[in-house]
Image (spheres, grey):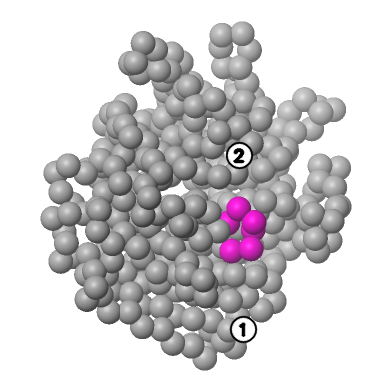
């Protein structure tokens, strides 16, 4: 398992996003600008610079259907960028925030996007055709600290958030006139806007990246205590599972399939987690390593009574993968990233839901493309 390509675009990259055809990549170089590069004659050339924000751009997403770019910044503003001719034209989004905007993501139907902020609020933004502008509705008084990550459920209604208060929450974002009540959304379309569906108290530290499985049946998020959490059947009686590891904490997470998750963070090397036939999640390997979990790894599981009362049946898995004993492999000079990985983006082909490639970016200023076509992981794809 090796990375396909790596390119250094800046001294530091906070996040990145790809165009629908993957011919261009937009990177945020820890400044108030966004740089767009295109691969020309086998060389990445800077073709556009998006300049509108006054402070560091810390969140970006590029819609795959409408080809729009949305950016958020510490200046408390958000812009939606439309390609008109050969230029990118910004449209201001009214967020009504008094603290920095921290993260952003388009909804699956791309008729809304969510913005997490340091104001303990989440902005659900949508386009008003009559006034020709983007407006937002706020989910307030639900978080006790900054919202670090947002993730849309495939039904376009439910939104998961993580916060530095250590909690993961799921909300309804149904907006009359924007969303429709249909059978695909299930009971979530009956909930009012901003209604909290569930609050998960599994982490005792800051919570960061969050992501839904392709089916929307499983939710995963990571904590700053070197743990990753999996929650099945999100609702009144979910099944929660916690996996601890000895390595440095993760910052972001992504479902490759229903049975495989990629986590990235301070270890500078993507980590693979997979579920067996019984639904038990465990650490498998670093993508930069050929070996799997050592045979002398100690693993154990137990039913937690406290979690059982709160979330129905819950499992707490502690997995000591002895990665520190293999530090020469996971932190060798030949690794793709040299500093913390802060962002992971899937590289899908058209409407194909299967992910075989993804890219990562980090504080070393690199964007790395990884290939999951390795035979030893084929059973999980």
Whether residue 198 appears in this view of the structure is: no
Q: Residue furthest front?
A: 375
Q: Is residue 58 above or below residue 302?
A: above
Q: Check disc 2 and report its element: helix, strand or loop.
A: loop
**Left or right: 262 with respect to 144?**
left
Nearest the camera: 260 or 25?
260
Whether residue 130 appears in this view of the structure is: yes
**Residue 132 part of the magenta segment:** no
Please report the residue visible at 37 percent of the width from the left and 40 percent of the height from the top. 370
Q: Position of residue 332 (x, y in %)?
A: 15, 49
Nearest the camera: 37 or 183?
183
Please report the residue visible at 60 percent of the width from the left and 44 percent of the height from the top. 353
**Left or right: 352 with respect to 297?**
right
Residue topped by disc 2: 352
Q: Position of residue 105 (x, y in %)?
A: 58, 42
Mark 1–mark 2 distance (CA, rounded to whole Å): 35 Å
Which residues lie in the magenta part?
213-218
**Left or right: 322 with respect to 6?**
left
Nearest the camera: 354 or 324?
354
Overall secondary structure of the magenta section: loop
Residue topped by disc 1: 312
How many neighbours does mark 1 have within 10 angstroms: few (below 14), some (14-19), or many (20 or more)?
some
Please report the residue visible at 69 percent of the width from the left and 56 percent of the height from the top. 158
């Amino acid at each position: 398992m090796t990375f396909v390509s790596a390119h250094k675009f800046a001294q530091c990259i906070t996040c990145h996003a790809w165009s629908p055809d993957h011919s261009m990549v937009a990177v945020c170089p820890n400044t108030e600008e966004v740089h767009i590069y295109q691969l020309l004659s086998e060389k990445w050339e800077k073709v556009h610079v998006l300049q509108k924000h006054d402070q560091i751009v810390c969140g970006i997403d590029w819609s795959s259907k409408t080809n729009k770019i949305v950016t958020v910044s510490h200046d408390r503003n958000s812009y939606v960028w439309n390609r008109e001719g050969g230029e990118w034209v910004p449209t201001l989004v009214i967020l009504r925030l008094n603290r920095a905007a921290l993260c952003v993501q388009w909804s699956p139907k791309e008729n809304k996007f969510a913005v997490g902020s340091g104001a303990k609020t989440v902005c659900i933004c949508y386009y008003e055709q009559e006034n020709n502008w983007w407006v937002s509705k706020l989910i307030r008084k639900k978080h006790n600290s900054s919202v670090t990550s947002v993730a849309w459920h495939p039904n376009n209604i439910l939104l998961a958030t993580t916060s530095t208060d250590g909690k993961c929450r799921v909300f309804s974002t149904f907006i009359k006139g924007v969303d429709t009540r249909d059978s695909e959304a299930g009971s979530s379309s009956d909930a009012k806007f901003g209604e909290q569906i569930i609050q998960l108290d599994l982490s005792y530290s800051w919570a960061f990246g969050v992501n839904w499985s392709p089916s929307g049946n499983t939710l995963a998020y990571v904590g700053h205590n070197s743990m990753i959490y999996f929650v099945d059947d999100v609702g009144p009686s979910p099944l929660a599972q916690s996996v601890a590891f000895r390595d440095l904490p993760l910052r972001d997470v992504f479902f490759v399939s229903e049975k495989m998750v990629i986590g990235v963070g301070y270890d500078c090397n993507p980590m693979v987690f997979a579920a067996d036939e019984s639904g038990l999640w465990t650490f498998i390997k670093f993508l930069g390593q050929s070996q799997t979990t050592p045979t002398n790894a100690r693993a154990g599981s137990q039913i937690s009574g406290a979690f059982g009362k709160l979330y129905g049946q819950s499992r707490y898995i502690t997995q000591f993968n002895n990665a520190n004993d293999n530090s020469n492999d996971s932190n060798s000079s030949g690794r793709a990233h040299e500093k913390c990985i802060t962002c992971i983006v899937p590289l899908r082909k058209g409407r194909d839901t299967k992910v075989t490639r993804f890219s990562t970016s980090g504080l070393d200023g690199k964007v790395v493309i990884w290939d999951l076509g390795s035979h030893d992981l084929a059973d999980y794809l």
